Image (cartoon, rainbow, N blue to C red):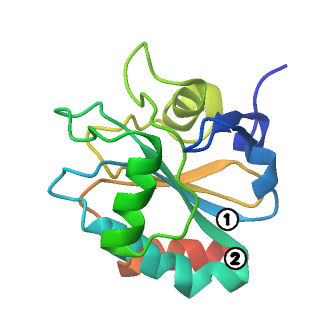
Amino acid sequence: MATKSIHDFEVKNLHGKPVSLSDYKGKVCLVVNTASECGLTPQLAKLQELQEEFAAEDFTVLGFPSNDFQGQEPLEGEQIKDFCELNYGVDFPMFDKVTVKGDEAVDLYKFLSEKEKNGNIGSKPKWNFHKYLVNKEGEVVDYFWPTTSPTSTRVKKAIKKLLS
């Protein structure tokens, strides 16, 4: 059976425990590959701002730490959680560190980035903080480049459209 939705995937949380992304059915999600030592790391604060603005409307950010770009995520598990909470007040779900590009990419990221797999979007992460917008049915509907601020008008408009 072909995968149609992120809800078909299971990932691990920062404690290594399995989490089904079907837990996010009915929510609009912004899936982001993060890193703690990147020039774009301050976007964690903007992602948290977005989380707070839309959380009451069935929206969530889903963070996936990745060390794929110049080794900018040296932390593991609990260290990632502590870093994000202490420095940026992050309370949106953060998952276990994953590979997001190339042949070694986890299945979720292959689905997010390959049009042949998700049916809509073909955009592989070129750097940390590449953002995928997913509708309430778990379908990938848009993406935003790493340099696009999470709180930009373009991102907020796209989220509001999916929430309405």
Q: Is residue 8 left or right of residue 61?
A: right
Residue closer to the observer: 160 or 68: 68
Q: Which residue is mark 2?
A: 163
The reply to whether discs 2 and 1 touch (Cβ–Cβ < 8 Å) is: yes
> What residue is rendered at 45% in x and 70% in y?
90
Q: Is residue 80 left or right of residue 68?
A: right
> What residue is rendered at 59% in x and 24% in y?
107
Q: CA distance from mark 2 to mark 1?
A: 7 Å
Note whether 56 is above or below 138 in the view shown: below
Q: Position of residue 116 (x, y in %)?
A: 59, 24
> What residue is rendered at 42% in x and 31% in y?
100
Location of residue 13 by image quarter: top right
Residue lying farthest top? Answer: 103
Location of residue 45 by image quarter: bottom left
Residue 164 visible in the picture: no
Quadrant in the picture for the C terminus: bottom right
Looking at the rendered structure, the secondary structure element under dot 2 is helix
Q: Earlier in the sequence, mark 2 or mark 1?
A: 1
Give, as a three-letter code, the residue at label 2: Leu
Give the numbered dot on residue 14: none
Q: Which residue is mark 1?
A: 28
| Label 1 neighbour load within 10 Å: few <14, some 14-19, many 20+ | many
> What residue is rendered at 78% in x and 35% in y?
8
Q: Is residue 51 left or right of residue 65?
A: right
Quadrant in the picture for the N terminus: top right
